[in-house]
Amino acid sequence: MVVAGNSITKKMFRNFIFILCCCLLFSCSTEPQQKIKVASKPKIEVPPFNADSAYYFVEKQVSFGPRFLSSNGWKNCAIWLEKKLKTYTPNVIVQEAPIITYDGKNHTLKNIIANFSPKKNNRIVLFAHWDSRHIADHDTKNQEAPILGANDGGSGVGVLLELARQFSNKNPNIGVDIILFDAEDYGQPENSGFPIMQDSWCLGSQYWSKNPHKASYFARYGILLDMVGAKNATFRHEQISSYFGSAILQKVWRKASHLGFGNHFVFEDAKQIIDDHYYVNTITGIPTIDIIEYDPATENNFNKHWHTHKDDMDNVDKNTLNAVGQTLLEVIYHE
Ligand SMILES: [Zn+2]
């Protein structure tokens, strides 16, 4: 009995261990199923930026010649830009306004505006200037002759036209407006001989900021592109952009660095530049940053060919256009 009793106790003990093991195994194998499932974010497909296409758009603008207010190149380029944008969206507006420049001349400026998903309240806005400088005041020769402005003017518009083409293929979730400002570069040169005119630069953005194309227009934020095409160009945290749009700067620079464009988008501060974003920020209140080349090696920290006759197609590089364009696509399609 003792033996029997003992053997029953052993059997019971073995059964107990067996059941315990089963329980442990069961609990182990079922543990993952008992976890609360976290909904995985749907993967967002960001289209690849086509730098060849952007380059072609720059080349096309330059083919019209210099594009300063009222010039032939300006007239023909405006017609082409409007037509081109209309192939990507039916919502294109050309905003016209009479202006007087520092030299006392009367012109009619044209801001060219394209809207994607215009009914969405959740929007962002992208800017560039489409005019080119009417003089070469930083060249050593032919200073009175107008420049081609391939990088200064052409490059920003080229990138935005390629983005417009992408939006027409696949709408981003967010509404986007593309605004091409006129008369950014008709500012008063030093020693012009004319009386000093305040705010003589950025006439198109000043006008639009005071008279937006739509009543009570607002966007969550804005990004301005200016001189975004030169070989090995670097972009830094320009002071006005940091002041008004620090979070946007961080977002864009982080995205760029994540994509491997840290060689172009450098996490360093740069001095303030009065560009179109200054007027957009101070007049409309839309926080807007400027992606603009900063060259530590030049006296004015702009590209070495800035406002010279060398700002031609040789000054435009597809790698730089791609870094800027792909970064913007990543930012926009993740909104
Ligand atoms: Zn310029």
Image: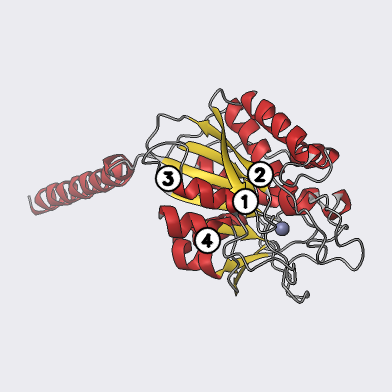
**Which color scheme is applied?**
secondary structure
Amino acid marked by disc 3: Ala
- In depth, the one of 135 and 213 nearer the eye is 135
Amino acid marked by disc 4: Tyr
Tell us which disc is closer to us: 1 or 4.
1
First reached walking from the N terminus: tag 1 or tag 4: 1
- Identified at 55% across, 50% down, the residue is 205
Give the CA separation, mark 4 to mark 2.
23 Å
Tell us which disc is closer to us: 4 or 2.
2
For residue 99, above or below residue 305 = above
> For residue 278, which numbered disc appears in the image?
4
Give the CA separation, mark 2 to mark 3.
29 Å
Residue topped by disc 1: 100
Point out the residue furthest to the left here.
1
First reached walking from the N terminus: tag 1 or tag 3: 1
For residue 227, above or below residue 180 = below
First reached walking from the N terminus: tag 4 or tag 2: 2
- In depth, the one of 159 and 240 nearer the eye is 240
- Identified at 78% across, 62% down, the residue is 306
Give the CA separation, mark 2 to mark 1.
6 Å
Give the CA separation, mark 3 to mark 4.
16 Å
Kindly indicate whether the residue at mark 4 contacts the one at mark 1 (C-beta within 8 angstroms): no
Kindly indicate whether the residue at mark 2 contacts the one at mark 4 (C-beta within 8 angstroms): no
Amino acid marked by disc 1: Ile
Mark 4 element type: helix
Mark 1 element type: strand
Residue topped by disc 2: 107
Tell us which disc is closer to us: 1 or 3.
1
Amino acid marked by disc 2: His
- Identified at 45% across, 49% down, the residue is 210
